[in-house]
Image (cartoon, rainbow, N blue to C red):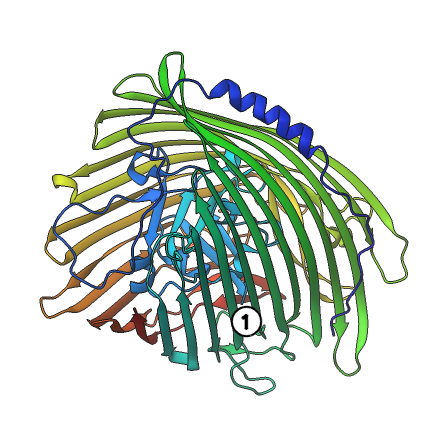
Amino acid sequence: MMVGANGIGRRRGLRGVLSAGAALGALSGGLAGAPGALAQVQTGPIETGPIQTGRLETGPIESVVVTALKRPQQMLAVPASIDVLSDRDLARDQVLNIEDLGRIAPNVAVAQFGDGQYRLIYRGLGATGTSDNENFNVAYDGTVVPYGNAYRLLDLQQVEILRGPQGTLYGRNTNAGLINIVPRDGSVPAPATADIVYGSFNTAGISGAAGGPVGDSGLFFRVAARGEQTDGFIDNRALPRDHTDQSKNGTVRATVGWEGGAWKAKIALTYDRYNGDTDDLTPATTPYSSPAPDVGKSSGHLTTPIITLSYKGGDYTFTSTTAFADTARVLTFSSVIAPILNGQSDRRDTLSQEFRFAGDADLFGRPTNWVTGLYLLNENDTFVSTLNLTHPVNLPLLYQHQHENLQSEALFGEAVTSWSEHWKTTVGLRLADERQSYDYVLSRTGAVMGADQSYPTVQPKLVLAYLPDRQSQVYGSVTRGFRAGAVFVNNALQNPGDPGYKPENTWQYELGYKRAMDGGRLQFQADVFYIDWTDLQVQRSILSVAPAGVFSVVDNASSARSYGGEGEATWRPLRGLQLYAKGGYTNARYVDFRPSPTLNYSGHRIEETPEFSAGGGFDYLTPVGVEVAADVTRYGSMAYDAANSIEQKPYTLLNASVAYALGDWRLSVTGRNLLDERYANRGLTSGGQAYIHAAPPANVMAELSLRY
């Protein structure tokens, strides 16, 4: 049984907002010089329409505008590795949750831990994690929020996936990459929608959305909701019982705003809730059958109001974003090898404030697009870890409690300057200071201990781009990434006096090429990268003898490195036909990692990182209105743990869909893993046995959609 707890620590408010804002205003005033604009930088509103069910044209591929870099830019003009999934892409591929993105973008993987929990991995970064509590690299409309993993992909304009460190603009814990979710907010007309989904494992869902501008009043709104449930595909042979990984979840989002003259204001509120069973670790030899003597539970919620106020001046835009996130998670799970339930509960509230100026100016007589801002954060987190014997009697074995207060301030800026028709540079810098205060206990009757830590950091960014013509660019970048250290109470199992771990730093280098050809009907991008780590944070599972159980602890690997590349191409050769190919390679290894005197993982592959992925597909709208799509991807081997004791062998995924639109209605059938490959995206060893989180076997989903 899970044991709840109240927070022990003290709360602190945001400080110095007014004085810092005044200083920022002075800084931005110095940057806002004579107007000028880069041809590649778009400063107007993003106009996107409904999901297209009509013909695919033979003309140029639509220009895609991304907003993850804090101001709108054309995707092919951004000197970075980036993927953008439109609303049409998301609907065609039945991308419903963030974990689905792992099969879309090269060198982006997802290690799933159960419903509502997973770890995003970019080029090997994020694979080792610290816990999902620290893996903040999901942004909602440009605002990073905790537990972004709880978001369902609902009523979206697009999803932007950026590989490489985003710390210059986003700060803490975005050194791996960023997923930016861009929802419809009603400011641009979009259709009302209603969808019903049903498929394998008794999976059923319903969703809908409506709203838009209210006449000529300047008011706009959008409301969307979604709920789904699944029986899952894991059966327990020890109890015995079927469907021991079943889950339910629901999401509601409402946005209301006003736009008039130079001003725009909006409030967006998202509420997400999930609950289910957690019998998701199974022996690698029997991936869909669990031997656990107990079935745990998982539940959580996320409530996030975000208030945005913006003003457009003559050659600049001011934006204020205030975000609050209240999140909670309760988790119990079987240790598999014994009648013991591990438990964790986590309650976090986060208040952030960002003031940002962006615009165009002349720098040394050259047109420059710039953004600068101030970011303030105050966060409180309460974490409880328990261990309970369940048979033959219910006996508490372990209780640990930790409360954290975190405060952070950061000043950031980035400028893109065109030095000639063919050359431009991007220079960025973030100056930040993070202070953490902890109270923790190692047993229910133990003494309260404390710790205070501070992490000042400097995160520079330099990009040089060469544009031979208006259809192509070559770029090179150097960026520093940072991930703060922390105290993790589970570490006290090994070192009671010092349960902390060090901050993680990276230098990342990237060389890329982008080009549009054949009148814009063919688009291509490719890059190579090299990452050098210092004090890589590694979360690993250990088996504790007294009390028995599987625990996660966090170590620091002295050094590690990763190198590889990605390539993607999209082509429209004929009316109604679109072809695409994609691939990625990552060689990520520990250079020096000795977690104990008897363990040496130096030279081992970094876990949860597929060695490669390569594949392609097509999307064809036939003359009779039937749309057919298919894709196939081959994945390389992947180690499950730092010891490289077990691994996932190479496998191939085949997905396909067929759809027919008649007026406002659309019926589609989507099949995933049609080759019925048995594979996993996470694993561990316990008692000499390999356990995995099995991915779904072959499954089919049908969807009936209405757009009106």
**Residue placed most toward the observer, 421 or 1:** 421
From the image, which quarter does the C terminus lie in? bottom left
Q: Position of residue 469 (x, y in %)?
A: 20, 26
> Callout 1, which amino acid?
Asp
Q: Position of residue 347 (x, y in %)?
A: 70, 59
The residue located at (45%, 51%) in the rendering is 609
- Rendered position, 237 above or below 577: below
The residue located at (69%, 47%) in the rendering is 379
The total number of labels drawn is: 1
Residue on which the image places disc 1: 280
The residue located at (30%, 34%) in the rendering is 77
Apparent side of residue 560 relative to residue 443 in the rendered image (left or right): left
Apparent side of residue 696 relative to residue 384 in the rendered image (left or right): left
**Residue placed most toward the observer, 650 or 215:** 215
- Evaluate whether residue 533 shows in this view: no
Q: Quadrant of residue 704 in the image?
A: bottom left
Q: How many other residues sit within 10 Å of disc 1, few (<14), some (14-19) or many (≥20)? A: many
- Evaluate whether residue 166 shows in this view: yes
Q: Quadrant of residue 546 in the image?
A: bottom right
Q: Position of residue 433 (x, y in %)?
A: 67, 32
From the image, which quarter does the N terminus lie in? bottom right
**Residue placed most toward the observer, 596 or 574:** 574
- Helix, strand or loop at label 1? It is loop
- Rendered position, 284 above or below 179: below
